Amino acid sequence: MITISDKSRWAVRALTELALRGDGGPVPILDVAERRGVPPHLLEQLFASLRRSGVLQSQRGVRGGYSFRRDPSEVTILDVVETVDGRLGPVDDGGRGCDRVWTDARDTVVESLANLTIADMAEREARLSDAPMFHI
């Protein structure tokens, strides 16, 4: 079954914010939550999972917060989704073997998510924010 929850979307949003900060220093979790509209208690849970999986590292204290342990160009969206929601497992076709379309769809989703990184998301967002706005 393919399950990608809102939690995964929020995690990608928050990690994109962290990547856009770019200096590599720790960023307070409340800053990220506020800028991305993610409930702070939820972001704490998500970042704790991402820290345990080796994506993030944390630093305590006045200048504490979270930063990337792995370079954002090495963190795929699939890594994030599978950390937050669990592995995107095989599709159960009911034992009939005739519903290959669902397995193909799962494989396409996995391939797409595996080929897109947090750095790619930050680059896309930066590009969009530089786009000219036309108001009528």
Image: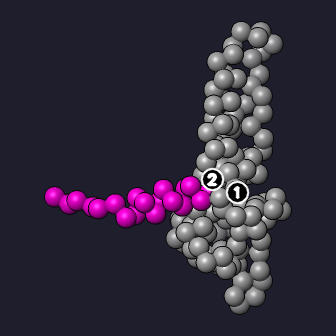
- Residue 100, quarter of picture: top right
Query: Which amino acid is tagged 2?
Result: Thr
Q: Find residue 123 and report its horizontal and vertical position in percent.
A: 51, 60
Q: Earlier in the sequence, mark 1 or mark 2?
A: 1
Q: Is residue 34 left or right of residue 92?
A: left
Question: Splitting the image into 4 quarters, where does residue 121 fall?
Answer: bottom right
Residue holding disc 2: 117
Mark 1 lies on residue? 74
Q: Residue at x 71, y 90 (%)?
A: 62
Callout 1 amino acid:
Glu
Q: In this view, does 25 lie to the left or right of 135?
A: right
Q: Can residue 48 be seen in this view?
A: no
State the predominant SS element of the stretch in magenta: helix
How packed mark 1 is, by other alpha carbons closer than 10 Å (few <14, some 14-19, many 20 or more), is few
Magenta stretch bounds: 118-136
Numbered tag placed on residue 88 in the rendering: none
Can residue 130 be seen in this snapshot?
yes
Q: Which residue is drawn at 65% across and 50% down?
A: 77
Rendered view: 61 above or below 81: below
